[in-house]
Amino acid sequence: MASHRRPVLAANWKMNHGPTEAAAVIETFLQRHAARDDRTVIMFPPAISLAAVREHTRERTDVKLGVQNVHTAEKGAFTGEISAGMAADAGASFVLVGHSERRHLFGETDEQTAQKCARVVAAGLTPVLCVGELLEQRERGETETVVLTQLRAGVSQLAVGDVRTMLVAYEPVWAIGTGRTATPADATAVHRVIREALRERVGASALDIPILYGGSVNASNAAALLAADQVDGLLVGGASLEPVGWASICGA
Ligand code: PEP
């Protein structure tokens, strides 16, 4: 890990923990995880639980909040959706864009991730652009092509200055929720490719863009992944749901 990038530990709760449970979980987590100025924690609860988590994290400037998805439009007749502006108003600072579940379960396209990133930035929020290949794509040797296509599309509508302040998460789809984790060396190899593509787009300041790894991270493998070259943080799904384990990952 490059020393000038402060590690980011991000929790994606997906469709788990309604407001009551979210409040209890975050409270226990905060008791177990003392504020540290050498790392940033970002919580991505379901949007409906954001207020509950916000209420409990007001005093903790080390803990930031985000939402898991927003719509491409600013507002309108899109029943069930939320906009980036609403997420900002509710206290979010970050938005996951292009998570593999959005791409593969809900059919989100590269064009939509591009529009969402632009919308997120326009609302004053920071996108965390998720990229990653399917198992069959890895087996066909297409990892680099897939990841670069998703990355280039995702940033295509952003100004250079906005790319410089965003985050990227490499999440191989075969590792998400499967218990199968990329090795630190696997992660480093893909993160290097991502870093190089970012450098082509924004120059030397690509070194400052955090690239997180995600995919079956847990308390046992977090430290090794975090120590890997080019891995600037972790995006954690299942293992972030339980507060004691999540605190242990945040202390890795
Ligand atoms: C995720 O959903 O971003 C994720 C990495 O999930 P898990 O940690 O459960 O594999």
Image (cartoon, rainbow, N blue to C red):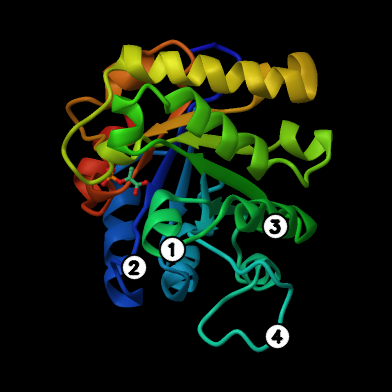
Figure quadrant of the C terminus: top left
First-in-chain label (2 vs 3): 2
Residue 33: x, y in percent? 33, 41
The residue beneath circle 1 is 56
Q: Amino acid at mark 3?
A: Gln
Q: Amino acid at mark 1?
A: His
Cα separation, mark 3 vs mark 4, equals 16 Å
Measuring 47% from the left and 68% from the top, which residue is drawn there? Answer: 50
Q: Amino acid at mark 2?
A: Ala
First-in-chain label (3 vs 1): 1
Q: Is residue 62 visible?
A: no
Q: State ligand 1's quadrant.
A: top left
Q: Is residue 105 above or below residue 18?
A: above
Residue 51: x, y in percent? 49, 72
Location of residue 208 by image quarter: top right
Q: Is residue 12 above or below residue 234?
A: below
Q: Point out the frontmost of discs 4 and 2.
A: 4
Asked whether, in this view, residue 134 is left or right of residue 7, the answer is left
Q: Is residue 97 above or below residue 137?
A: below
Nearest the eye: 106 or 74: 106
Residue 150: x, y in percent? 56, 39
Cα separation, mark 3 vs mark 1, equals 32 Å
First-in-chain label (3 vs 4): 4
First-in-chain label (4 vs 1): 1
Nearest the eye: 75 or 55: 75
The residue beneath circle 3 is 115
Mark 4 lies on a secondary structure that is: loop
Mark 4 packing: few (<14 Cα in 10 Å), some, or many (20+)? few
The residue beneath circle 2 is 23
